[in-house]
């Protein structure tokens, strides 16, 4: 039991730290995932949506800290009970999500590792078993250091986690795991390679032959002989290759301008997923920066899911000299973790990104 507890302690501690750090690297992204869980289609807790960012920071900091506490043996009883309660809640959440097919990606490892709902549930079940081992054998979890060093390490883990969370919120994630990261070409991320795996669909044919009802399963050709097809049911066995970017568009009221703008050599995108919730200080910085970019020969556009009235009011209020085009809100949130945020493209390749706090640092 002692060795089993030691192995479980290391696995759970390391996994909680890794999972927590990945989400701590992008707490805004995790808050979007929490909003999805709080929505009417999942847990139906819309009153929590405005607090999603605060809850996100608390959860990921707590996750990292619990991992550190477990590894160093700090506050044994508090740590084990906290781990158990947390994993029971997340096991229920991932099961609910998987069984009712509510959320396609749990966000357990942010954008670094995508897990299907059932994969997420399986991971939580394994963690639950390991934490139950720790619960039963908690007497074998002893502090690694004496009381003072253990307390200092625990406090440092808490303070460093808080600082990282604050820093990435005021700027951008330290590591960008998304398809729009610097260096990626958007057209390539949207394309499907010729040799990519195709979707696999199973067809179940119910038909009549010589007055007898029969069933035939294949990939879509159907039975070779039949008198009457009663009905056909389809089931997707494998999704095949899915491009990393699927929904990126740049649209005016009349046409799709995605290809046109992605071919531009020097393009500045001002991303504002929702103009009404954009940071006023950030909006105030746009005029001087975008005018400077235009004077240097850049094409400047805005991307937002907001309506035309909000776009025109913004342009008039801040005297902006660029047009704002339509793009899906979720996509704009994914492109850059800031509202507003700046993205610079060269023939569709992302060459720079910046939070509105760092607009002055962008080199044109």
Image: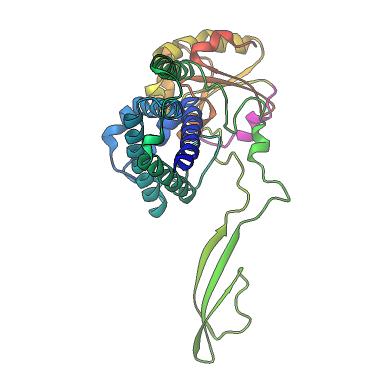
The residue under the point 42% across, 11% down is: 281
220 above or below 249?
A: below
Q: Is residue 361 visible?
A: yes
- Residue 275 horizontal/vertical position (percent): 41, 23
**Is residue 289 one of those drawn in magenta?**
no
Would you identify the image quadrant in which residue 266 lies? Answer: top right
On the question of residue 328 being in view, the answer is: no
Residue at the spot 36% in from the left edge and 35% down from the top edge:
139
Q: Seen from this angle, which residue lies furthest right?
A: 195
Residue 293: % across, % down: 61, 12
Q: Is-magenta flag for residue 262?
A: yes
- Would you say 281 lies left or right of 187 here? left
Quadrant in which the N terminus is drawn: top left
Q: How is the image coloured?
A: rainbow
- Closest to the observer, 140 or 49: 140
The residue at the far bottom in this view is: 210
| Residue 222 drawn at (x, y percent) | 60, 75
Most distant residue in the left direction:
47
Up-down relation of residue 199 to residue 27 (above or below): below
Asked whether, in this view, residue 112 is left or right of residue 298, the answer is left
Q: Magenta: predominant secondary structure element?
A: loop
Give x and y (percent) for residue 29: 46, 30
Q: In the displayed structure, would residue 336 be above or below residue 88?
A: above
* Region rendered in magenta: 253-265
Q: Quadrant of residue 31?
A: top left
């Amino acid at each position: 039991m002692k060795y089993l507890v030691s192995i479980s302690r290391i696995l759970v501690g390391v996994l909680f730290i890794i999972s927590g750090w990945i989400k701590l690297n992008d707490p805004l992204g995790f808050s979007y995932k929490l909003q999805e869980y709080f929505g009417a289609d999942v847990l139906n807790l819309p009153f929590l949506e405005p607090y999603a960012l605060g809850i996100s920071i608390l959860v990921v900091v707590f996750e990292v800290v619990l991992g550190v506490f477990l590894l160093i043996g700090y506050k044994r009883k508090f740590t084990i009970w906290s781990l158990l309660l947390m994993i029971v809640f997340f096991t229920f959440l991932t099961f609910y999500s998987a069984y009712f097919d509510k959320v396609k990606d749990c966000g357990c490892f942010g954008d670094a590792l995508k897990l299907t709902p059932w994969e997420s549930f399986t991971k939580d079940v394994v963690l639950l078993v390991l934490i139950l081992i720790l619960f039963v054998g908690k007497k074998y979890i002893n502090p690694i250091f004496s009381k003072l060093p253990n307390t200092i390490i625990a406090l440092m883990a808490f303070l460093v986690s808080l600082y990282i969370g604050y820093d990435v919120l005021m700027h951008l994630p330290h590591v960008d795991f998304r398809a729009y990261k610097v260096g990626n070409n958007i057209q390539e991320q949207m394309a499907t390679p010729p040799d990519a795996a195709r979707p696999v669909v199973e067809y179940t044919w119910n038909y009549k032959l010589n007055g007898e009802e029969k069933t035939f399963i294949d990939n879509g050709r159907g039975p070779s002989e039949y008198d009457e097809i009663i009905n056909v049911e389809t089931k997707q066995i494998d999704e095949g290759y899915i491009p990393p970017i699927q929904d990126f568009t740049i649209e005016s009221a009349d046409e799709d301008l995605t290809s046109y703008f992605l071919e531009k050599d020097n393009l500045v995108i001002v991303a504002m997923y929702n103009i009404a919730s954009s940071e006023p200080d950030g909006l105030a910085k746009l005029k001087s920066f975008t005018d400077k970019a235009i004077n240097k020969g850049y094409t400047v556009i805005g991307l937002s899911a907001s309506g035309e009235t909000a776009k025109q009011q913004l342009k008039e209020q801040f005297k902006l000299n660029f047009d704002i085009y339509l793009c899906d809100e979720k996509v704009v949130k994914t492109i850059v973790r800031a509202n507003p945020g700046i993205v610079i493209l060269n023939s569709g390749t992302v060459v720079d990104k910046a939070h509105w706090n760092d607009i002055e640092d962008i080199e044109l």
